[in-house]
Amino acid sequence: MKKLLYTLLAVSIIFSACKKEDEEENPNSPFIGYWSGKYYQEDSTTQIGIWNGDISSSGEINCQAISVDVPEGVDLIGTVTNSGIFDAAIGTGDYGVTFYGQLNGNYGSGEWSSSIDGSTGFWEGNNYNQ
């Protein structure tokens, strides 16, 4: 009976420790605020669109990407870690565009790629709250 009690106690401690780690992973993102930027076709200085939106205190990215092909805009959703790793997407899987990069202070840049047509490019942006 004691052995079972100790086992249950150990398991509950492990689960509570794991939960605490998850909660503390991004409690106050250093990248909070309104961000806006541009994205370009690979090997080109021609801008093909803009993106803008907010990063929350938990590091959630909720933006919109606008281009000549999609002037009404599409949702760009993802996360940014406290160390600045930016990972967001338009759509999912076989029909989507992924934006990946690095934020540092009030500036960020990275690459984007489309699983729709295989096109790629780069992006950059700034935080206008800092």
Image (tube, grey):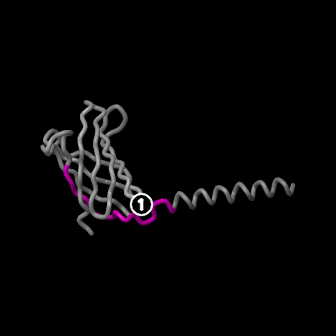
Q: Tell me the residue at 73%/57% (across/down).
A: 10
In the rendered image, which quarter is residue 111 located in?
top left
Position of 63 with respect to 45 (left or right) is right
Give residue 112's position: percent from left, percent from top: 28, 42
Front residue of 95 and 102: 102
Q: Is residue 34 part of the magenta span, yes or no?
A: yes
Position of 118 with respect to 80 (left or right) is left
Give residue 25's position: percent from left, percent from top: 49, 59
In the rendered image, which quarter is residue 28 located in?
bottom left
Position of 16 with respect to 75 (left or right) is right
Q: Is residue 64 above or below residue 32?
A: above
Position of 8 with respect to 81 (left or right) is right
Residue at disc 1, secondary structure:
loop
Front residue of 51 and 85: 85
Residue under numbered circle 1 = 82
Magenta-tinted stretch: 24-38
Q: Is residue 97 above or below residue 31?
A: above
Q: Is residue 27 part of the magenta span, yes or no?
A: yes
